[in-house]
């Protein structure tokens, strides 16, 4: 089944990180000091113009009132991070979709804490060059040193 009407049949590539949960503890108030819980490398040439890239991660963490912060990054650019932190919960499923208008022009839904529903503002655009190898990182940081943050799994799916 084609991804878009009139296009060639869809091809799917999946890059996955899993296994035992990857944990981090230790306090930091800075996203620049965020722990990298998982990394997926997208080889050069894995995407084509008009591809869809879906990045998904399941994070679990200590249920407390302290702020926990999660993020997704392509190269050196954050494509999503929660600003107010997740508190009073046990886990979060984070998903971001990037539509490649070209190999170095992408668009996605505006950032929100929960990434569902209607958003204000225009969809952000990025300029990652997917003709080159790109690294996707799953990040976490906490305001309390004893909080545990874990990446249960992460994957990148590419449709074109």
Image (cartoon, grey):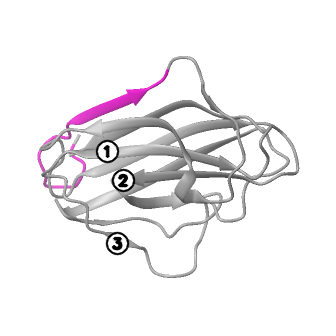
**Residue 22 in picture, x, y percent from top left:** 57, 27
Q: Secondary structure at mark 3?
A: strand
User: Up-down: is 11 above or below 144?
Assistant: above
Q: Secondary structure at mark 2?
A: strand
Q: What span is colored magenta in the figure? A: 2-18
Instruction: Please state which of residues 143 and 127 is positioned toward the viewer in this rendering.
Output: 143
Say which residue appears at 81% left-offset and 44% top-offset.
89
Between the C-alphas of marks 2 and 3, the distance is: 13 Å
| Residue 41 numbered tag | none
**Residue 126 in picture, x, y percent from top left:** 32, 68
Is residue 114 found left or right of 66 in the rendered image?
left
Say which quadrant the N terminus sits in. Answer: top left
Q: Secondary structure at mark 1?
A: strand
Contact flag, marks 2 and 1 (Cβ < 8 Å): yes
Q: According to the image, label 2 marks what residue?
A: 74
Q: Residues within 10 Å of mark 3 (few under 14, many from 20)?
A: some
Between the C-alphas of marks 2 and 1, the distance is: 6 Å
First-in-chain label (1 vs 3): 3
SS assignment for the magenta stretch, majority: loop
Say which residue appears at 68% left-offset and 58% top-offset.
29
Say which residue appears at 19% left-offset and 64% top-offset.
104
Is 13 in the magenta? yes
Instruction: Please state which of residues 109 and 82 is positioned toward the viewer in this rendering.
Output: 82
Instruction: Please state which of residues 106 and 6 is positioned toward the viewer in this rendering.
Output: 106
| Residue 125 numbered tag | 3
User: Up-down: is 152 above or below 149?
Assistant: above
Q: According to the image, label 1 marks what residue?
A: 135
Between the C-alphas of marks 1 and 3, the distance is: 18 Å
Contact flag, marks 1 and 3 (Cβ < 8 Å): no
1 vs 3, front mark = 1
**Residue 70 in picture, x, y percent from top left:** 61, 50
Is residue 92 found left or right of 54 in the rendered image?
right
């Amino acid at each position: 089944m084609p991804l878009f009407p009139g296009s060639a049949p869809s091809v799917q590539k999946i890059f996955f990180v899993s296994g035992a949960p990857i944990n981090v503890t230790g306090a930091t108030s800075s996203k620049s000091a965020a722990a990298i819980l998982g990394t997926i490398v997208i080889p050069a040439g894995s995407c084509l113009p008009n591809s869809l890239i879906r990045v998904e991660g399941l994070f679990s963490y200590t249920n407390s009132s302290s702020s926990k912060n999660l993020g997704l990054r392509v190269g050196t650019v954050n494509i999503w991070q929660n600003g107010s932190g997740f508190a009073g919960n046990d886990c979060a499923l984070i998903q971001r979709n990037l539509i490649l208008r070209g190999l170095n022009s992408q668009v996605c839904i505006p950032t929100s804490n929960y990434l569902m529903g209607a958003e204000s503002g225009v969809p952000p655009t990025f300029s990652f060059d997917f003709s080159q190898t790109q690294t996707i990182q799953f990040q976490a940081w906490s305001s309390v040193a004893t909080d545990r943050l874990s990446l249960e799994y992460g994957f990148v799916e590419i449709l074109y």
